[in-house]
Image (tube, rainbow, N blue to C red):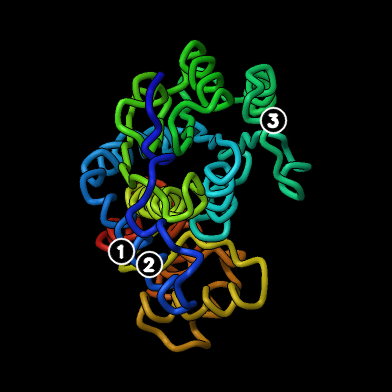
Amino acid sequence: MLKSHTEDRHPASDGLHLRDGVAVLADLLAAQAAALAALRPALPALAGLADRLAPLLRGGGRMGYAGAGSSGLMALSDCLELAGTFGLSPDRTPMLFAGGAAALLHLTGDVEDDPELALADLDRSGLASGDALLVLSASGRTPYALAVARAARARGIRVAGFANVAGAPLLALADDAILIETGPEVVTGSTRMGAATAQKVALNMLSVLLGIRLGHVHDGYMVNVVADNAKLTDRAARIVAAVAQVDRAAAERALSQTGGAVKPAILVARGAAPDAAEAALKASGGHLAAAMDGQ
């Protein structure tokens, strides 16, 4: 059986309970920083994955997330934030979480060992051939993760496997293998610490790069943001004002003409008619820079 290095002993583990609070926290912080450093070797794989996923999403495909326990929570966090940050509709990014909504209130370990549950979740997701699925497992051998990855590949779904142990079965199964070798945890086996932190940051980086590739980020602004609360409405106006280089009142007028959509509002604020702004964005594949260059 593959040895899971996430279950090995960390040098800082011995005597952990005897040290004072500041010393314990310093050890934990150092371990978290080391986990983040483990991401650097994975950057080329993450960049390549973004380049493969962007055309899929641009063409109307879907990108799901799957995981159990702490890894599932990291996946869920990224999944839930895509709509508000990049304007991706939730039906484009289904989440497969072992145990479903009930497990979010009370995490239980048995659901991650149930391959039948994984298959049922994949059926419900609606993912099909040509779509993609990001599957996360710290050990890379969680039965739920392996079952969903195998079934997804059999259906023609592109699988990206994220694991924290070299040689993990999930990485061997995946079309895209993302290894983040974080090693042992200070609290032995507690992969909600270093392994999960590294997984979440990997997903943060991947989704931002995807947002850039899809044209949803311009000069660091979230130009495809969905303004569905007061904070985001205010942000939308500030983005339009900054990118179009107009005052707040002009930005708000432009947003009122585009139903609150930021990209066309920027073009409207720069002098385009709303219909012309939409046409320019369609012609540029949704990339604001290209549409602005054509004005």
What amino acid type is highlighted by mark number 3? Asp
Q: Dot 2 surroundings within 10 Å: few (below 14), some, or many (20 or more)?
A: some
Q: Name the residue that disc number 3 marks.
A: 110
Residue at the image point whose x is 30% and y is 68% from the top: 219
**Image position, residue 73 (x, y; %):** 58, 48
Asked if the residue at tag 3 contacts the one at tag 1, i.e. Cβ–Cβ closer than 8 Å, the answer is no
What amino acid type is highlighted by mark number 1? Met
Q: Name the residue that disc number 2 marks.
A: 27
Asked if the residue at tag 2 contacts the one at tag 1, i.e. Cβ–Cβ closer than 8 Å, the answer is no
| Residue 293 falls in image quadrant | bottom left
Q: Is residue 103 left or right of residue 146?
A: right
Q: Name the residue that disc number 1 marks.
A: 292
As drawn, 210 above or below 17: above
Q: Nearer the viewer, mark 1 or mark 3?
A: 3
Q: Is residue 289 left or right of residue 187?
A: left
Label 3: element kind: helix
What amino acid type is highlighted by mark number 2? Asp
Residue 286 appears in the rendering: no
| 186 vs 168, nearest the viewer | 186
**Image position, residue 257 (x, y; %):** 58, 69
Q: Quadrant of the C terminus?
A: bottom left
Residue at the image point whose x is 43% and y is 39% from the top: 7
Q: CA distance from mark 3 to mark 2?
A: 31 Å
Q: CA distance from mark 1 to mark 3?
A: 53 Å
**First in sequence: mark 1 vs mark 3:** 3
Q: Nearer the viewer, mark 1 or mark 2?
A: 2
As drawn, 164 above or below 267: above
As drawn, 160 above or below 7: above
**Number of marks drawn:** 3
Residue 110 appears in the rendering: yes
